Amino acid sequence: MAGLGPAIHVFDGARKEVVDGRPKADHDDRENAMDFTLSDEQRLLKDSIDRLMADRYAFDQRKTHLKEAGGWSTALWSQYAELGLLGLPFAEQYGGFGGSAVEIMLVMEAFGRALILEPYLATVVLGGTAVRLGGSDAQKSRVLPAIADGSMKLAFAHGERQARYDVTDVMTTARQSGAGWVLDGAKSVVTHGDCADTLVVSARTSGERDDAAGITLFLVDATANGVARRGYTMRDEQRAAEVSLSGVQVGADAVLGEVGNGLALIERVIEAGIAATAAESVGAMEALHGMTLEYSRTREQFGKPIGSYQVVQHRLAEMLMSLEQGRSMAMLAAMMVDEPDAAERAHNIAMAKVGIGQAGRFVSQNAVQLHGGMGMTEDLAIGHYFRRCMVIERLFGDTAHYLAMLATEVE
Amino acid sequence: MAGLGPAIHVFDGARKEVVDGRPKADHDDRENAMDFTLSDEQRLLKDSIDRLMADRYAFDQRKTHLKEAGGWSTALWSQYAELGLLGLPFAEQYGGFGGSAVEIMLVMEAFGRALILEPYLATVVLGGTAVRLGGSDAQKSRVLPAIADGSMKLAFAHGERQARYDVTDVMTTARQSGAGWVLDGAKSVVTHGDCADTLVVSARTSGERDDAAGITLFLVDATANGVARRGYTMRDEQRAAEVSLSGVQVGADAVLGEVGNGLALIERVIEAGIAATAAESVGAMEALHGMTLEYSRTREQFGKPIGSYQVVQHRLAEMLMSLEQGRSMAMLAAMMVDEPDAAERAHNIAMAKVGIGQAGRFVSQNAVQLHGGMGMTEDLAIGHYFRRCMVIERLFGDTAHYLAMLATEVE
Amino acid sequence: MDLRFTPEELAFRDEVRAFIRDHLPAEIRERMRLGYGPRKEDTVAWQRILNRRGWAAISWPKEWGGPGWTSVQKMIFLEENQVAPAPELSSFNITMLGPVLIQFGTDAQKQRFLPRAANLDDWWCQGFSEPGAGSDLASLKTAAKRDGEHYVVNGQKIWTSTAHHADWCFVLVRTNPSAAKRQEGISFLLVDMKTPGITVRPIISIDGAHHLNEVFFDNVRVPVENRVYEENRGWDVAKFLLGNERTGIARLGKSKERVRSAKEMAREVREGGKPLIEDAAFRQRIAQLEVDMKALEITQYRVVSAYDRQRDGRPDPLSSVLKVKGTELLQATTELAMDVGGPLSMPIWAEELAALSNEPDVGPEWATQATGSYLFLRAASIYGGTNEIQKNILTKAVLRL
Amino acid sequence: MDLRFTPEELAFRDEVRAFIRDHLPAEIRERMRLGYGPRKEDTVAWQRILNRRGWAAISWPKEWGGPGWTSVQKMIFLEENQVAPAPELSSFNITMLGPVLIQFGTDAQKQRFLPRAANLDDWWCQGFSEPGAGSDLASLKTAAKRDGEHYVVNGQKIWTSTAHHADWCFVLVRTNPSAAKRQEGISFLLVDMKTPGITVRPIISIDGAHHLNEVFFDNVRVPVENRVYEENRGWDVAKFLLGNERTGIARLGKSKERVRSAKEMAREVREGGKPLIEDAAFRQRIAQLEVDMKALEITQYRVVSAYDRQRDGRPDPLSSVLKVKGTELLQATTELAMDVGGPLSMPIWAEELAALSNEPDVGPEWATQATGSYLFLRAASIYGGTNEIQKNILTKAVLRL
């Protein structure tokens, strides 16, 4: 844990130099406690990502990436591959680097600061975790190296239109046919489902709607017959898709993990997603706080910078406190994502989800408020970070959903 | 309602001249909208109480009243009688003045500003409502004139140790014996139960604990054999008592209302109590806000009055908003207390209870906070008002209790 | 209102309710129930229906087509109109321009502009804010130089809501740059949006929609007869306009409509295996909002009923309480409605963003619209003086600190 | 701590837990579990037990009896001690006086005072605040005139916690009234409370209890040898003392203990006909508090673990985050505990007010004690610099505004 204890890291938000209205990552900020708590490899990793983001993800460059066909930058995707980011969490035998949750946290924080658009969460974190933890050697050998070299993108096709946030509400069915299976149903709001080459699909192989048992995960070729996708843009400008499956035939080797016991694996995938987006949210909050602080220094009202008004100062101090409490929760999630005790893991990650959701809402809403009219415009970065925090709070279930879960566990 | 619409009444808190650290009621504040919304009688009533409080209830005088044997001023009790306050809500045939909920609101607001100690709530509002609404002509003729002339004090002995806030959790029993009844059980935290001459006691005449049916109200002579009382002081310096009843014999004429159908009457009594304490809370909030505003003008820190700091200014503005929202809820309760539709009445008064509880907590907690160390001392009035708001929030059930009730009614 | 209207007021509310029920075009009501904002043609159509009934120019005297309502009646009407839900009256035409012309305008100006404003024959917009002059209005820079019978206007306005729909714009300009106080040397002009030299540039807001604009003035010639009140006395006009009656500033009807809609939709979605409407925490959240709305409803009634009694014409500083509490509720209730949709609230609904993308709709319209309202109403605590400014006003005007 | 202590830290926590379990007198633990504050004799007894173990002077170097713990170990110890619940170490002796003497004291002063302070043979109190000088400490007026080998002290201190128990008091006095800056001309004196001319007057606080005092100095003669550091340099000492290590400032263990106690008692009382612990809203409230406590626990770990790495000795401004969030939780958790008791929390428990009344106890002790803690801890956001002051510190030191 000490390796995650950058008490002074808090100064980031306050010290960052601001480039095109967004704080630039500081490479050799002496006060950045991570300097002395990161291993050399971690340091190298963080620096190289920060440098890449500074060079390629200025807010105007981001607008260009958005205009690409898929709504994100294929060139940067290759860069991520070259940097080894796409294989980061995988074992070396699968072309990976055996990175831990801490490395993923560093990457997602940097991505959050830059508000990236590429399908890293969907492919490496969600899809990657499903295959890494649930896949057979054959499946891992087929998928993970392809993820690592950037040639295969995944998406986690679990949520359904009627399910809202209920993880066991799976009505998509898979029935045996010969050696293989036939899938029918529909998946909703599948993050980056439009560009995925392979879909990790949850389907019911037995039991009724809401049953915990009887859910199975399948690896489905996104171009297979019977798979139809409607891609669209989310409020945070990331892409998602509605996926319909009608009579989709897959082989026995498409089953990921155990037939009928998919729920545990689904929960691991979701937990990994929560931990990753928690870190991303911290990066976004850093950017929001940094931009708002900078704005409060320059924007004048009644002849004084608004940052000279005590109410604005205290609001920024409260945003800072929320950011730091949120950062603590992102660290908790990162530490817990590999915890063997499932109940302990789920409980702590649920706490992190609630904490991050509330921190992100407070910081992003006040960042818009303190920017006044400017915060309402699409031209400024503020509103884009605001909406990313809004979407993150609702990925995998919202704050109320996890608080209710925690309430049932009170004893 | 227009008669209750003192939009400018809000200025009270801001304008009141402050005497011994407590704002003095303003007699001819032109901006007090009540001037032109009160009837002449109401105006007369308000003026006479405000004048009495100004003359006899300065904070130091209050300390003297506290030292009296009963913990309140018998002399003022007689004054209330002379002013007609003790008979205010009763019909003229019973020595009363047929005052409405609005008059009670005016009285309780003034009492709240002065933080009075006398058993007005217990005797006139709670006991008085029970007899006024539930009593036979004989009972009314016996009790109401005695209340009005100050010769009889009542207390509402309903709550029990195990019940917490559950109104139907009555374990005290009454069994028939000959023409009369024998009562056994214990009542807990009976407001001003120690000085009461007559107790309005709820007891189970049939059914089980928590049954809505089977509860009956009795008028019990506090000095009757088998009645034992332990009086004590509450956190707000008002008096209360634990009352035990063992084999207490009462006649058939002691039954208040219908045998077994006491719950409806109990609810009317509680609703009247909520409306009255809501108004009292508004008076207390006015005093708290007025004192804090005054303190912020005089108390200096770092060479400037603390009221010159924007954060303090905005906090005071937020307290003002809470006070006004609370005042609105007290008006709602006053208007609803005589509403014939029981469900409508209960729902609106529950809303008022929640609103007043939250407003009182916000205003009183921040009044202490802005007073700093001084707010923590028993010597200042602030802490005493603070604790009265704290107790009022928990009379008849706390905010969570009524919010839960409202939540069940959402449709 | 629950808090005991007079029988007359109750009868009036029923009359308003019935009229809206019978005359609001079904197609407009349906779109708005789904959470869509009214289209320009919806607003025009409905305001004309109301105008025929004599209910459009609600805050104008009878001689200019006003209904002669009390403030309480106006409050009732506005709330019923929001709850319906129906398009709101053009506040630029009715609440801002109308009273200004009636107070400061020449007979010719009144004759020419008032009837068309009431009937929304002219769509007006407000040219006040400028870059760098948000809540600090008096620092405006847009200049108007006198040139014979015209003013020549140069400068820029921003946050100009519906300028892209507008036929006319009332604009604050600086006619005397060398005035001693900033407030002096400002004039109030009526500008035909078709005048050469005016450029309207859209500002897309964070809901992805086009409500706001920048308006650029490049040697725009405005006839002197279109100046309201004296030259360099425009600040008096602006103060009157801003301090002008604030009935409806709380927009409580809109909040009530959002909660009603959220409860309705919460029957159709699930949380923890049962309908969301049965979820304990969700019900608590609704109950708390209903308590807060009730308190504001009564406070509004107290403030508004006092308007009619005030003789000094000073704006009531308590309007700031309505603004703060009202916008807090607007933001809480629109967030609630968005949360009901859950994941389905996060995709962008295509038509809303037609300009920016060509994606088909996904998910129920109400969910995507709920998010749009949530996003746009983040501005509710900013426009018309931020909530921080409102607390400054209370500090000065009420607390006297 | 859940957040992965090192194996060494885990072993240390278990060692501390075991020692407290085995050595904390049962009668003290029982009273404190019921919510009572420790009596003077409880605090003395427990600190001596800890001192025998070498665990009293936790923030002192080994040569002066310190255990040589890291800040993280201190944090673990303090939390275990609070959760037990056991009496807390005298912060005046251990956190304030000790480090000051070690940094600024003469050998004679160290020899004379440190061992007795560690063992609580001397009970120390702090004479800093004055009427009119709350958070603005430098404006203090208490004067000390040099008279041969003595200072003659005249003036008044206020909010002097436990002065009525104290043997000694460290006092800030003004030795040079004509100094250019207010901060100059202040000296730091050690005063024997038995010195003639000292009057201690109790301040009853809103919980009805006697924690605080006014201390009056009337020509109190203090030997010059009892001045710490140079004359007129006392501000440096005070700054060191106030900026000194803030481990435990969040008092998280106390909040955890309050929640544990609230859950325990919530099984014994009812809400809506079932045990309160089964009430949905109550469980949500607990869940939210546990989330907030977890976040603070990790933030505290991050801040405290950085103390050991800091070389510049500057107080970490992030301590202000711990102070604000910690006191918010203290106040929320004590309010929770009070709410569990419901009506039974409202009567005064007699012993608490022995001085003021002679009433017998009513209701369960835990309920009445819960209210006492709630009331007294309203001061938590006031003492040691109000939470508003803490935000000013963050503004200056972190935001650099």
Image (spheres, coloured by chain):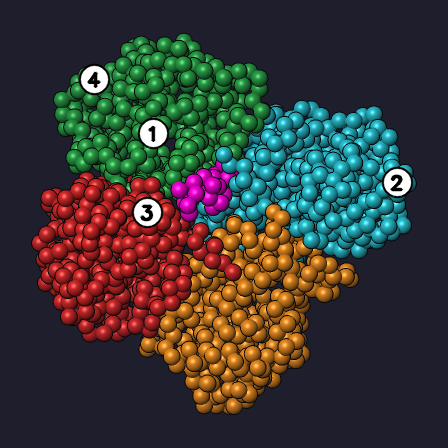
Chain colours: A red, B cyan, C green, D orange
Mark 1 touching mark 2, by CB under 8 A? no
**Residue A406, position in %: x, y?**
44, 56
A230 or D371, nearer to the observer: A230
Kindly identify the amino acid type of the residue bearing the numbered disc 1: Leu
**Residue C42, position in %: x, y?**
29, 20
Q: Within 10 angstroms of label 1, few (less than 14), some, or many (20 or more) residues? A: some
Mark 2 touching mark 3, by CB under 8 A? no
Magenta: predominant secondary structure element?
A: helix
In this rendering, is residue A248 above or below B130?
below
- Callouts 2 and 3 in the same chain: no
Which quarter of the rendered picture does the N terminus of chain D lie within?
bottom left
Q: In the rendered image, which residue does mark 4 sit on? A: C223
Image point 57% across, 41% down: which residue? B405
Which portion, as a residue range, is magenta? C270-291
Comparing marks 1 and 3, which lies closer to the viewer? 3
Kindly identify the amino acid type of the residue bearing the numbered disc 3: Val
Chain holding disc 1: C
Q: In the rendered image, which residue does mark 1 sit on? A: C34
- State the mark number for residue C74: none
Q: In the rendered image, which residue does mark 3 sit on? A: A170
Comparing marks 4 and 3, which lies closer to the viewer? 3
Q: Kindly report the distance in space between the C-alpha atoms of the residues bearing marks 2 and 4.
A: 95 Å
Chain holding disc 3: A
- State the mark number for residue B180: 2
Compared across the picture, whether A288 is left or right of A312 comes to left
Q: From where the camera sits, is residue B407 visible?
A: yes
Label 2 secondary element? strand
Compared across the picture, whether B1 is left or right of A219 comes to right
Comparing marks 2 and 3, which lies closer to the viewer? 3
Q: Kindly report the distance in space between the C-alpha atoms of the residues bearing marks 1 and 4.
A: 44 Å
Kindly identify the amino acid type of the residue bearing the numbered disc 4: Pro
